[in-house]
Amino acid sequence: MLSNQIELKLSDYSDLYDLVIPKNHILREIKEMVDFSFIYDELENKYCLINGRNAKNPILMFKYLFLKCFYNLSDAGVVERSRYDLSFKYFLDLTPEEEVIHPSLLTKFRKQRLKDKNILDLLIRKSVELAMEAGVLKSKTVIIDSTHTQARYNKQSIRGLIVKEAAKLCDAVKKAGSHEDLPETPDRRSTTDESVAYSKELLNIVRNSACSELPGVKEHADLLDELLQDDADAYDYSNDPDARIGHKSATGSFYGYKTHIAMSDERIITAATITSGEAFDGTELPELVAKTRKNGMEIETVIADTAYSTLENLKEAKSEKFNLVSKLNPCITKGMRPEDGFYYNKDAETMQCPAGNLATKKRIVKRTKKNSQLRYLFDIEKCKSCPKRDGCYKEGSKTKSYCVTIKSDYHAEQEAFQKTDDFKKILKNRYKIEAKNSELKNIHGYDKCESAGLDCMKLQGAVSIFAVNLKRILKLKGGVCPDSENHENF
């Protein structure tokens, strides 16, 4: 049961917050800037208002998730730090002596209360509103790009994941200067059960050692324990239902998801979509532009890389009256047919089929009295067993190719535009979004999914983007962050 009133808590020790937490502490500034009551309004219908025990306030639970993302902690880590860190308790609206929640409640909150909620659009819209109210969002230019996130339950075996996390724990123990006799690491031929047994023995030794309460050691121990205990079907970690294989180069790939981001010139994220890893970047541009405008920002210019200069996007820019500053790819200028499902993968520098497979070869075919074609050849063995072969691969064929031809006035106009000095000057600002992607990954743990499934990835993306937007707004307002845990360069 959810109470229809937010409880006012009084304590004789509340004055400690004014003594210990500086006025310009980043959590104090965020708390003063953001009215989190919108979370209560959005989630109220997910609770019963008349029956059952009193539930934890959804604002409190969301703030725990925010801190978890903001400081890149585990569930157990954020709860443990909230127990002794007064800045955390102040942000959570807890009294200094008040007890914290059990970490398992965060899992239930994510799965039961945030289910079926479009939390990604909600939090981005809220942060954009805050930026506009603060007067720091003034430009009419957005930069668009995508960043990839590795699936937590990836193609690596559960044995490999456990051994890797156990190795991190061992390194943390050694860095702490502990002289504990740690168990011998299992060799590469060990079974999953042997690796699990080794990890449990390691955890038992570390938990009973003198260094067990050191932050670095404790956090790695919690992460290993979370990996072992997270799901009943832990041995099926490779079966993420929504993750797919995407390509970052001709030889490099990843297994996971893509987050497609629109960011203003002030480096505030104004819209985002999250897809599986094999999705083509260019198709997300219209939705990102539409969401940005819906969130209240005017758009005159869109900056993007070559993946977004498709014929459809050039037409979209013309009809929606914005300048698309995106270099044409030679293959895109040669008359591709998007309805076929084939796209040019700018990271791998070759063509990609509807099933996500890359072309293995390419050749130029010159034709008499017609424009030349660029022909891409695909691995025929993959085509024979491809689930999307109907209508694409003809049974018995010995080759599978796809050809593109130059034939578009839109491309000719764009080609002339990209030769101008204005185009070249505006395009130089594209680097800003690369730094934002790096911030998400390296500071807020966005390089790896916290759980399996597209819905969980959207929740992680929502909270991460909300966090970086709030930091950026404070930076633009002239806020200072004395709590320098990786936040000094936001």
Image (cartoon, rainbow, N blue to C red):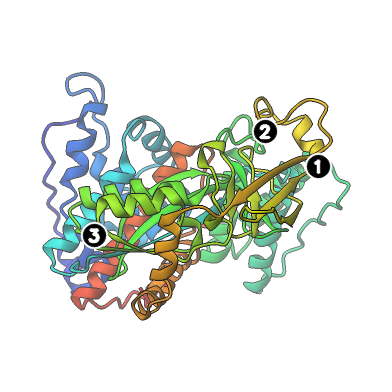
Q: Quadrant where the C terminus lies?
A: bottom left
Q: Could you tell me which secondary element the residue under label 2 belongs to? A: helix
Which mark is drawn over residue 9?
A: none
Q: Nearer the viewer, residue 142 or 62?
A: 142
First reached walking from the N terminus: tag 3 or tag 1: 1
Q: Nearer the viewer, residue 358 or 212?
A: 358
The residue labelled by disc 3 is 299
On screen, 75 above or below 14? above
Q: Quadrant where the N terminus lies?
A: top left
Which mark is drawn over residue 194?
A: 1
Q: Position of residue 147 (x, y in %)?
A: 50, 57
Q: Could you tell me which secondary element the residue under label 3 belongs to? A: loop
Q: Position of residue 291 (x, y in %)?
A: 28, 48
Q: Amino acid at mark 2?
A: Asp
Question: Does residue 269 appear left or right of residue 443 in this picture?
Answer: left
Q: Amino acid at mark 3?
A: Ile
Residue 418 falls in which quadrant of the image? bottom left
Question: Is label 2 in contact with label 1 (beta carbons under 8 Å)?
Answer: no
Question: Is label 2 in contact with label 3 (beta carbons under 8 Å)?
Answer: no
The residue labelled by disc 2 is 236
Q: Residues within 10 Å of mark 1 (few under 14, many from 20)?
A: some
First reached walking from the N terminus: tag 2 or tag 1: 1
Residue 326 falls in which quadrant of the image? bottom left
Residue 248 falls in which quadrant of the image? bottom right
Q: Residues within 10 Å of mark 2 (few under 14, many from 20)?
A: few
In the image, farthest residue toward the front: 369
What separation in Å lies between label 2 and label 3 (alpha carbons)? 45 Å
Q: Position of residue 489 (x, y in %)?
A: 38, 77
